[in-house]
Image: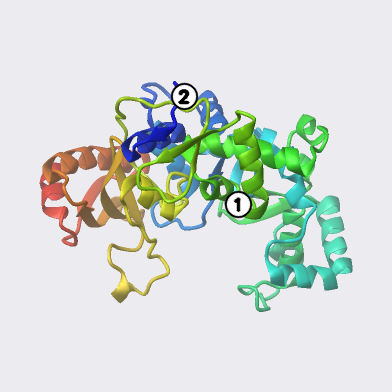
Amino acid sequence: MPRLSSLTVDQARRIAVVAQGFGEARPTGRVDRRHLRKLFARLGLIQIDSVNVLARSHYLALFSRLGPYDRALLDRFAYADHEAFEYWGHEASLIEANLQPLLRWRMTGDHRWGGMRRWAGQNADAIAAVRAAILAGGPASAGDLDGGAAKKGPWWGWGDTKRALEQLFYTGHVGAIRRSTFERAYCDPALVVPSDVLERPTPEPRDAIVTLLDRSARGHGVATAKDLADYFRLPITVARPLIDEMADAGMLERVTIDGWKHPAYLHPEAVLPRRVEACALVSPFDSLMWERDRVERLFGFTYRIEIYVPKPKRVYGYYVLPFLLGDRYVARVDLKADRTERRLLVQAAWIEDGVDDLEVAHRLADELRVMATWLDLDDIVIAERGDLTPALRTAVG
């Protein structure tokens, strides 16, 4: 891309959408591990979330970009072939395996939760005993180690064993696999991170954070310092001066973006397309949606996840996915998989202002059909709620 000193919001948005992997056509054949490698190399990590009302978010992130694929492929990629590992990246995440050395500074630091720091400081012997049990006995959950004892304690019902395991996981002394129930089982890190990665030298924290910021910039395309720090949840007080140093060294390009209050930084390999042909339902935990302020700056799209909002106070619904068409969010849809009756439930559908609802409805209907097939659901059932539902019901037929 030619060097630019300023961008319009439209240009910044197209750069960001392409950087996030929505600028290419979905594979026409079978999705395989080569596609996953390419996607992880682009994004660096994918957030995990336990909500399963539709499909777990890490599966949705791949579907949004690659279309239908065998979800077991991602499980094998991460937990059997160890091309990604589970750790704290942007919240709990599946992270490209090669990035593990860059996160060791986090593992050697204090837990980010103050309560856990205090508890760990007072219970070193208990933590050591739990670690010894995991290394000696193999993968185990907190329930396995507790022998089914009732959960207790103030940490979301966590008992001491669970606290110890989470402390060990944060510090990298145990790794994690997932059982078929999505329960996390803890294990020797050597079982989940390739040996050649574990054997690599540990970089200095400054060098590691600079490399993570470069990966953040690749994933964003163009971003503010706060956006870049948020990608891997890096401390902004550490990240900001490093970002300026990276810009001085030519690793990033300083740019202004119309209407943005803060300076932005463009990655030198970012691409500015004339147009974007994306068509995707996007998880609320997708990396394109992580920083809500950024979403509003780029898309003019205000989003609040309402899972934790009491039902009478919800505006759009429980699990609402934005619908990306081209380079804009044009609608939002509250979706649920009724697995017993094999139905994809559209509990509400809403159109954004200034958008042609008939065109959006037809494109959304096509995407819902693809999603239903991917989730092994037979029917699409559309409720009454939302100003897009009449057109969507007609389009679905």
The amino acid type found where label 2 is placed reads Arg
Circles 2 and 1: CB atoms closer than 8 Å:
no
**Camera-side residue of 315 and 266:** 266
Question: Relative to 305, does residue 105 appear above or below in the rendering?
Answer: above
As helix, strand or loop, the secondary structure at mark 1 comes to: loop
Residue receiving disc 2 = 3
As helix, strand or loop, the secondary structure at mark 2 comes to: loop
Image quadrant assignment for residue 368:
top left
Describe residue 264's horizontal placement relative to residue 388 as left or right.
Answer: right
**Camera-side residue of 8 and 344:** 8
Image quadrant assignment for residue 143:
bottom right
Q: Which mark is residue 233?
A: 1
The amino acid type found where label 1 is placed reads Arg
> Residue 362 at x, y = what percent?
16, 39
| Mark 1 residue crowding within 10 angstroms, few (<14) / some (14–19) / many (20+) | some
Describe residue 333's horizontal placement relative to residue 282 as left or right.
Answer: left
Quarter placement of the C terminus: top left
Q: Which mark is residue 101?
A: none
- The residue at the point 35 percent across, 42 percent down is 258
Q: Do we see residue 74 in this rendering? A: yes
Q: Give me the C-alpha separation between circle 2 and circle 1.
A: 28 Å
**Camera-side residue of 95 and 177:** 95
> Residue 265 at x, y = what percent?
51, 38
> Residue 225 at x, y = what percent?
55, 46
Nearer the camera: disc 2 or disc 1? 2
